[in-house]
Image: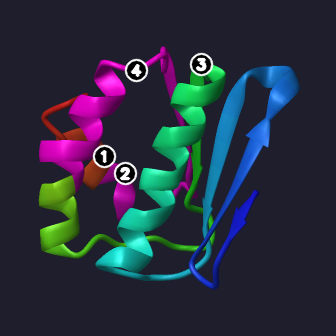
Amino acid sequence: MYDTPYCRLQHLKEQNAILCKWKQFCKGDDYRNPLKFAAQVIKKYQISTWITDTTHGFESDEADTKWLLEEFVPSMINSSIKKVVFIITQDSPLIDEIKNKRWL
């Protein structure tokens, strides 16, 4: 569905989900464009579950984190998404970052 060196998106039709698998660090459009594309797919198919796989590492640029919290997350709150799932390793530094997000 969408595949770059940084991110792969899949529409999991049977689960009414979208899977966002991060492959490596990216920022700017390389980070934002997959999320914007996913938002279009979510709207088109009324997808209810967002799955993010960070097992191969993921790290946010400060500007992208700001964009995520100020633009992307609010648009998802008003979308058909009802459940968000993180696939993450037990020792990932993202655990603390995810827990500290004000939207959780």
Residue at position x 29%, y 70% from top?
A: 60
Distance CA(mark 4)–CA(mark 3): 8 Å
Most foreground residue, 95 or 62: 62
Residue 19 to residue 83: above or below? below
Q: Which residue is mark 4?
A: 79
Indicate which disc, 4 or 3, sits on the residue closer to the N terminus: 3
Indicate which disc, 3 or 1, sits on the residue closer to the N terminus: 3
Please name the amino acid that badge 1 sits on.
Answer: Ile
Residue at position x 52%, y 53% from top?
A: 37
Indicate which disc, 2 or 3, sits on the residue closer to the N terminus: 3
Indicate which disc, 1 or 4, sits on the residue closer to the N terminus: 4
Distance CA(mark 3)–CA(mark 1): 25 Å
Q: Which residue is mark 3?
A: 46
Q: Secondary structure at mark 3?
A: loop
Q: Which residue is mark 2?
A: 95
Query: Mark 3 and 1 residues: CB-CB less than 8 Å, in contact?
Result: no
Distance CA(mark 2)–CA(mark 1): 5 Å
Classify mark 1: residues with Cα within 10 Å, few (<14), some (14-19) or many (20+): few
Most foreground residue, 61 or 9: 9
Q: Is residue 20 left or right of residue 31?
A: right
Distance CA(mark 2)–CA(mark 4): 25 Å
Outermost residue on the right side: it is 14
Q: Secondary structure at mark 4?
A: loop
Please name the amino acid that badge 2 sits on.
Answer: Ile
Q: Secondary structure at mark 2?
A: helix
Q: Which residue is mark 1?
A: 98
